[in-house]
Image (cartoon, rainbow, N blue to C red):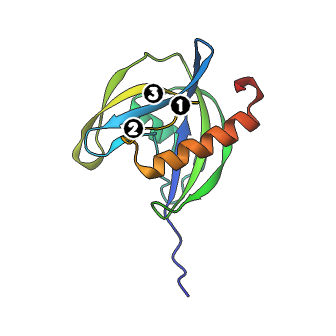
Amino acid sequence: MNSRKPPVKVCPVVIRKRNDTFEILAFRHPLAGTQLVKGTLEPNEDIIPAAYRELWEESGINEVTNSKYLGSCYMPAKDQFWHFILCHVAPQPNHWNHYCLDDGGHDFAFFWHPLDQAADNSWHPVFIQALSWIRQHILATEPELS
C-alpha cells in the first residue's frame, strides 16, 4: 500500500468585476504558459497565510483586505491536492509584470481573464481544471459574484 500523500498547494483566487464581467487574475509564465497563482503549502503553515504569501511572492500583491476559503480538490494532472482561497484586494492595474524569485527568477505577465471565457491552449491542463473548479464553486457559493 502506498502511503505517500500528494503535495498540497494553495491557490489564492482574485476576482474583479469589470463592465459587468467577472475576471480572474492570471499570468503568463515565460516557460510554462498561462497560469493562476498557486504554490506549495509549507510544513506547519496554515492555508490562509500560505495563500497570502503565494499571492505576494508571485504577483507582488501584498495586501489582502478579506478572504474566504472556497474549498479543495484533487488535481490528477499533477497528482496534487489544491486549496482555493478567495482573496479580496485593492483595485489592481489591467496588466503588470512582476519578477518572481521562484526557479531562479522569472518575469510573470499578469492580466485579467474573463471568468466565463474558456481557457485556450496556452493554459496548462492543471490550470484549466482549476479554472473549471473555480467557475463551478465561486458562482455557486458567492452570490454577490453571480
Q: Mark 1 points at which residue?
A: 117
Q: Name the residue under label 2.
A: 57
Q: Which residue is drawn at 48% across and 65% down?
A: 79
Query: Which amino acid type is marked by label 1?
Result: Gln
Furthest residue toward left: 104
Quadrant housing the N terminus: bottom right
Q: Nearer the viewer, residue 69 or 126?
A: 126
Would you place residue 6 above or below residue 47 in this image?
below
Q: Nearer the viewer, residue 31 or 100?
A: 31
Image coords of residue 92 (percent x, y): 47, 18
Query: Which amino acid type is marked by label 3?
Result: Ile
Image coords of residue 14 (percent x, y): 55, 30
Q: Quadrant of residue 141?
A: top right
Quadrant housing the C terminus: top right
Query: Which amino acid type is marked by label 2?
Result: Glu
Q: Name the residue under label 3.
A: 61
Q: Residue at x 54, y 39 (%)?
A: 12
| Residue count near mark 3 (Cα–Cα under 10 Å), binned few <14, some 14–19, many ≥20 | some
